[in-house]
C-alpha cells in the first residue's frame, strides 16, 4: 500500500513506462480471461439448447417412420 502523498504524485505525474507496460499486460490478461469465459458460457448454453431440440427431432422422425409402416 502506498502513502497518500505518493498516490497523489502518481496521479499528477502519471506512470513510468515500465508501470504502464505492466498495467497493459494485466489489462490484456483480464480481457482474455473475460473473453474465454464468455466463449465457454456461450458454448455451454448453446449445447444445452440444441440437445433437447435434436432429441425432439429424432422422436418426430421415429414416429413418422413407424406410422408410415
Image (spheres, rainbow, N blue to C red):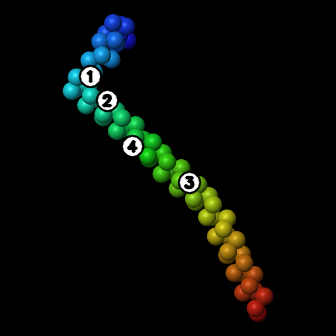
Q: Which quadrant of the structure image shows residue 7?
A: top left
- The alpha-carbon separation of the residues under discs 1 and 3 comes to 41 Å
Q: Nearer the viewer, mark 4 or mark 1?
A: 1
- The alpha-carbon separation of the residues under discs 2 and 3 comes to 32 Å
Task: Tell me where residue 33 appears, x and y as whole percent.
Answer: 42, 41
Residue corresponding to mark 4: 32
- The alpha-carbon separation of the residues under discs 2 and 4 comes to 14 Å
| The one of 13 and 28 positioned closer to us in this rendering | 13
The residue drawn where x is 26% and y is 17% is: 13
Helix, strand or loop at mark 2? helix
The N terminus sits in image quarter: top left
Task: Tell me where residue 17 appears, x and y as whole percent.
Answer: 21, 27
Helix, strand or loop at mark 3? helix
Give left or right: position of 10 versus 44. left
Q: Nearer the viewer, mark 1 or mark 3?
A: 1
Give left or right: position of 34 versus 20. right
- The alpha-carbon separation of the residues under discs 3 and 4 comes to 18 Å
Residue corresponding to mark 1: 15
The residue drawn where x is 39% and y is 43% is: 32
Q: Nearer the viewer, mark 2 or mark 4?
A: 2
* Dot 2 or dot 3, earlier in sequence: 2
> Dot 2: within a 10 Å radius of its alpha carbon, few (fewer than 14), some, or many (20 or more) residues?
few
The residue drawn where x is 40% and y is 37% is: 30
Q: Which quadrant of the structure image shows residue 21?
A: top left
Is mark 2 in CB contact (under 8 Å) with mark 3?
A: no
* Dot 2 or dot 1, earlier in sequence: 1
What number is the disc on residue 23?
Answer: 2
- The alpha-carbon separation of the residues under discs 2 and 1 comes to 9 Å
* Dot 3 or dot 4, earlier in sequence: 4
Is mark 2 in CB contact (under 8 Å) with mark 1?
A: yes
Amino acid at each position: 500500500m502506498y502513502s497518500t502523498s505518493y498516490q497523489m504524485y502518481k496521479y499528477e505525474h502519471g506512470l513510468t513506462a515500465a508501470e504502464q507496460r505492466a498495467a497493459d499486460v494485466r489489462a490484456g490478461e483480464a480481457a482474455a480471461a473475460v473473453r474465454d469465459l464468455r466463449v465457454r458460457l456461450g458454448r455451454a448454453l448453446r449445447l444445452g439448447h440444441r440437445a433437447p431440440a435434436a432429441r425432439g427431432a429424432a422422436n418426430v422422425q421415429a414416429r413418422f417412420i413407424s406410422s408410415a409402416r
